[in-house]
Image (cartoon, rainbow, N blue to C red):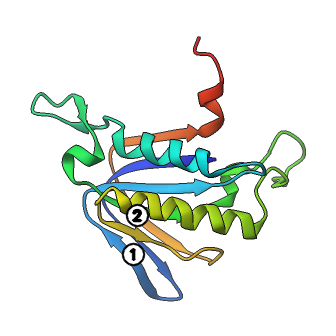
Amino acid sequence: MRALIQRVAQASVTVEDEVLGSISAGLVVFLGFAQGDADSDAQYIVDKIVNLRIFADQQNRFNRSALDTGAELLIVSQFTLYADTRKGRRPDFNQAASPDEAQRLYEYSLGLFRQTGLKVETGRFQAQMQVQLQNDGPVTLMLDSADRHRPRR
């Protein structure tokens, strides 16, 4: 499971001219699911995201988490996080989970995010969405649940 996280001043997601979700200061989280991902991958990613210390403290240092600050979350599914671009000019998405499994993991992840008590807004699974955001910092991070099994250098 992969998550692209952007710290934002504000963000919204629209489908067919309807705003589905809108947040003020917080995080936009793009989630992608791979074949073989399990509930444990979602648990790892959600816990990592809400506890990452990427918000400034009084000394303007990254010492506060989304939970510490009461950040708002905009969660958007994005299978393109599993694009393989090593060959040719057209991305290959063979590593991405099937739509049914990805939707199950997306819904499961949303439930975990909501259990934190943070405000959670979403897009619509498998919809053509327009995401508007004002990146704050800018701060953009990529998480991959497979990394927890790799040794640190």
Residue at point 65%, 26% (across, down) = 149
SS for tag 1?
strand
Answer whether residue 77 is visible to the viewer in this image.
Answer: no
- x, y (%) of residue 26? 30, 55
Viewport quadrant of the C terminus: top right
Q: Which mark is residue 21?
A: 1
The disc, 1 or 2, on the residue closer to the chain's N-terminal end is 1
The three-letter code of the residue at mark 2 reads Leu
SS for tag 2?
strand
Asked whether 65 or 18 is in front, the reply is 65
Q: Quick one: label 1, few (<14), some, or many (20+) residues within 10 Å? A: many
Does the residue at mark 1 contact the one at mark 2 (Cβ under 8 Å)?
Answer: yes
Taking 30 as reference, is 3 above or below it?
above
**Residue furthest bottom as drawn:** 17
From the image, tell me which residue sits under label 2: 74
Q: Quick one: label 2, few (<14), some, or many (20+) residues within 10 Å? A: many
Q: Which mark is residue 30?
A: none
Disc 1 versus disc 2: distance between alpha carbons?
Answer: 7 Å
- x, y (%) of residue 29? 47, 55
